[in-house]
Amino acid sequence: MLITPIVTSPARVRRFPPLSALIVGLRSSRPQIIRQREQRDGDTFHASQGSGGIHPLPPSILNHQGSAGTVCRAATFSEFAAASRSRSVSRYPLASRMRHATLPSAGRLFPAPGGYYYVDSEWGTLKEVLLASPEHLSLVPCNAVSIEAVRRGLASCSTRSAEQHRAMAAALTKAGVDVHLAPAMPGMPDLAFTRDTSLMTPWGLVGLRPGALHRRSEVDVVLRAAARSGVPTAGRVESGQVEGGDICLLRPGVVVIGVSGVRTDAAGAEALGAMFKIRGWTVITTEIDARLLHLDTHFCMLDQNLALGCTERLDPAFLAEVAGLGVKVIPVHLDEVSALGCNVLALGQRRIISPGTAPRIDEAVRRLGFEVITVALDEFTRCGGGVHCLTMPLRREAGSFGRT
Ligand SMILES: NC(=[NH2+])NCCC[C@H](N)C(=O)O
């Protein structure tokens, strides 16, 4: 079967209705799709499905100079109509304004066919993020932290998890981040951890392939929700397994993939890594301890040259490589990792959101001049995920060097 991604120009993307209008009710969204369906000859391409690995974009649009636009998945009108009927998307605090992205400029290291939606680092100023409703959250004993929580007799409380999730969304909004919310899905107890199902790149959103089988069907839900917001899809990993918590866009041009063999394996890392390599990125794979679940529980970027890391567990060769790239690692202890205290979200401009479970780390980061915003997330941390796992950035300002 052939699929035909649709191409729009950045200028068209700029004219999209405000995201707040798209999210709350999506009443004005049909024109957006109509605009996406306008194709420009020469920029259209076909990618075959079912060939294994990831569907790459054609070389003709790689190394693109930033003028030809955005590659979009053609969302069907029925998807769009379904989205406009959805009620659950309207409950969150949303930024009423829409600040448009700085679109790709000549000076950019990786000009962006992805256009408006764009992420090339873990620390560029965060502008838009995708969350998913925790309505069906439950404590699945599928990682060391959640197994221990179940052993201690803990359970999930839907009222508290909803409150904490809303408070996190409110903190994001207050920090100038627009929030998109995927609807709840019965039978998907870990859906709220949107980080793991997909990855936003400079070229569009990539669907991942979770190693946890109970999470695999989450990918379609998240991709559909993103498509309703007009986020272009760049491809999908179709071999091996790879979860977003194991991926770190260390800086523009360097991606790290943690391989535990359980959630992310070598085949999945290779499939995803190929997408970056073909665009000239350096792909660093590092073996991680499966008991720590994901890379992002024990290695998280705070800023362009600063990270939190569990130096007692990370591979010394990886730490040496990171040091060679000029990134300083603030050591975190294993008990802080288990408390998800290392699993923080960089907002850019020296601001982070932290679950506040490791005061020593928060204090150390504050002393470095960061604003540390804490949100209570114990309903989620007992499931093995914190604020980094609960957020999937859709748009960050392009990472730029030279700043300290
Ligand atoms: N990126 C992360 N660390 N995600 C945490 C996911 C937690 C979830 N209960 C799971 O085990 O899949």
Image: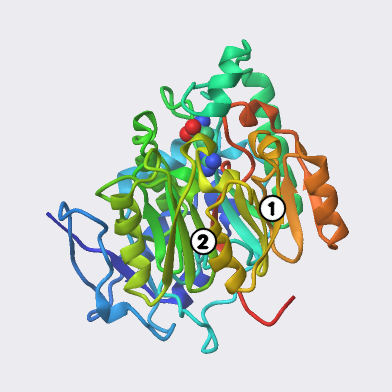
**Three-letter amino acid code of the residue under disc 1:** Ala
Q: Quadrant of residue 70?
A: bottom left
Does 159 appear above or below 295?
above
Please tell me which residue lies in front, 118 or 225.
118
Q: Residue furthest bottom?
A: 106
Tag 2 residue: 317
| Quadrant of the snapshot with the C terminus | bottom right
Question: What residue is rendered at 45% in x and 69% in y?
Answer: 202
Instruction: Determine whether the residue tagged by mark 1 lies in a helix, strand or loop.
Output: loop
Q: Earlier in the sequence, mark 2 or mark 1?
A: 1
- Vertical position of residue 273 compared to residue 338: above or below: below
Q: How far separated are the C-alphas under marks 2 and 1?
A: 43 Å
| Residue where numbered disc 1 is placed | 95
Instruction: Residue 234: give x, y in percent of width and height.
Output: 34, 62
Q: Which color scheme did the rendering employ for the protein?
A: rainbow
Locate the N terminus and report the quarter of the image it occupies: bottom left
Local crowd size for mark 1, using a 10 Å CA cut-off: few (<14), some (14–19), many (≥20): some
Could you tell me which secondary element the residue under label 2 belongs to? helix
- Position of 381 with respect to 76 (left or right) is right
Nearer to us in this view, 355 or 223: 355
Q: Residue at x 42, y 44 (%)?
A: 260
Q: Position of residue 333 (x, y in %)?
A: 70, 42
Front residue of 81/258: it is 258
Question: In the figure, is residue 155 to the left or right of 48?
Answer: right
Of badges 2 and 1, the one in the foreground is: 2
Instruction: Kindly identify the residue that appears in the image at 87 percent across and 58 percent down.
Output: 367
Is residue 135 among the parts visible in the rendering?
no
Indicate which disc residue 278 carries.
none
Q: Residue at the right extreme?
A: 367
